[in-house]
Amino acid sequence: MRKTPLVPIALALMAGILTAHHIAALPTVALLYVMGLTAIVCGLLMVLRRKAVIPLLLFVMATGGMLDRINDPLFAPNDWRRTEQPNVHMLVRLVDTPSPRGKSYRTMAEVISIDQSAKHGSIRLYLKKDSTAATLRYGDSLLLHGYPDVERGYLYLTSDHYLIVGRDSTSLRARCERLRMRLLHRMQQGPLDRRHAGVAEALTLGWRADIDPETQASFRDAGIAHLLAVSGLHVGLVAALVGAALFWVNKERRGRIVRGCIQLAAVWAFTLFSGMSPSAMRAALMFSMFIVNYIFKRRTSSFNLLAACALLTLCAQPMLLFNIGWQLSYAAVAGILLAIPVIQLFRNRLWQTAIVSIAATLATMPITIATFHRLPIYFLIANIVIIPFAGIILGLSLCYIAFPCPFFATPLDCMLTASEALTQWVASLPGAVIEF
């Protein structure tokens, strides 16, 4: 509690959310009453005693339980999946830009009402490819009717079953999405090979619809599928690239402020223009804390910063605790932080990269096996070779967005060809993947 006081507090909040989520037999009102009473008693104990660690943790745990029951869709009476009508009229709002998937466009939407009754929750929409679906963008409001799959949370639609009733053209997210689509079109019209352009689009704009299925499979079996989804690695690389470009800035207080502010602007600009995925937002928040800590030279534990980020995200959205992306992000960072003493023993960049890769993989291995029931065996080979060059590939991809010309397309194409060949070789090795 003295060195890393936020870590046990974050763990207590998680314990409270888990406890309330799994005690489904207890009515919501009764659970909220018990949790509220526990919080009040613990609060009084903390006021009466200066050192009240256990009451504090119980207070946080009770708060986590209340947050879970308030936000958990399993116990929400207005969740759209509790509807009983097979054919419904639903008002929804798109929360991302539809992406092509085979014969349809796939997108996520936020439910606003069903048959004019207020509802909430998310639904996945599959829209038949036609001229109407091709015009849909983030923020569009749709009035639709159909037979949603309540258990799986999705709905298939043709253009006859939905109507565009509103468009969002003023919010920051909507404007960023429009710019993102323009940048995507700019990349697609450039000279880069289409097979490799899909990987570059995923690295820079978070657009994975153009990635070849074979490429996805080889990256997954080689243990580097995380490269194709904008996450902490990409946000960290952007911060590192900007920091390297500002090597000439002095390290005094004024220089640290200038460098840190530019890094913060670059991190959040990249997050906005890459689709603002939950993993990218979490990474941006986490790196922002580390950058601010660097600016003011605060001797704050990295675990405290990680726990503070977890507390902020879970207080805002308690259900993120059950999100696989959230679990993998924090497990990977925690594993790397635990391995820092070992990493510091080596001066060679190759060995440091290898240890970082091993630490992140070992930390996320239990979650990966429990969720995907598969484990890439030769992940270390691909990570050692490709991860050091990931920053160069990302930097070239960002330059290619600004200037889609052969000057940047040629080296980027060469590096992506080499990385693809390596991943295919690793994925083809005997026993490359163990399935559970």
Image (spheres, rainbow, N blue to C red):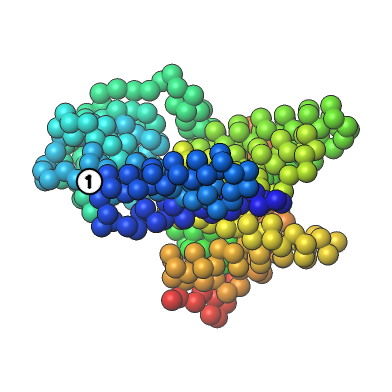
Q: Is residue 117 above or below residue 205?
A: above
- Picture coordinates of residue 52, whole percent (x, y): 59, 48
Residue labelled with disc 1: 81
Q: Is residue 100 above or below residue 184?
A: below
Closer to the camera in the image, 266 or 417: 266
- Picture coordinates of residue 102, whole percent (x, y): 34, 51
Residue 283 shows in the view:
no
- Picture coordinates of residue 304, whole percent (x, y): 66, 47
For residue 243, side relative to residue 152 (left or right): right
Where is residue 165, by image quadrant?
Answer: top left
**In percent of the image, x 34 and y 41: which residue is there?**
70
Query: At numbered mark 1, what does the secondary structure look like: helix, strand or loop?
Result: helix
Closer to the camera in the image, 321 or 427: 321
- Picture coordinates of residue 103, whole percent (x, y): 30, 48
**In percent of the image, x 88 and y 32: which residue is there?**
252
Dot 1 alpha-carbon crowd within 10 angstroms: few under 14, some 14 to 19, many 20 or more: many
For residue 300, side relative to residue 101 (left or right): right
In what quadrant of the picture does the C terminus appear? bottom left
**In percent of the image, x 33 and y 28: which residue is there?**
140
Hey, which residue is sitting farthest front in the picture?
A: 48
Closer to the camera in the image, 423 or 120: 120
Hey, which residue is sitting farthest bottom in the picture?
A: 430
Hey, which residue is sitting farthest top in the picture?
A: 170
Residue 341 shows in the view:
yes
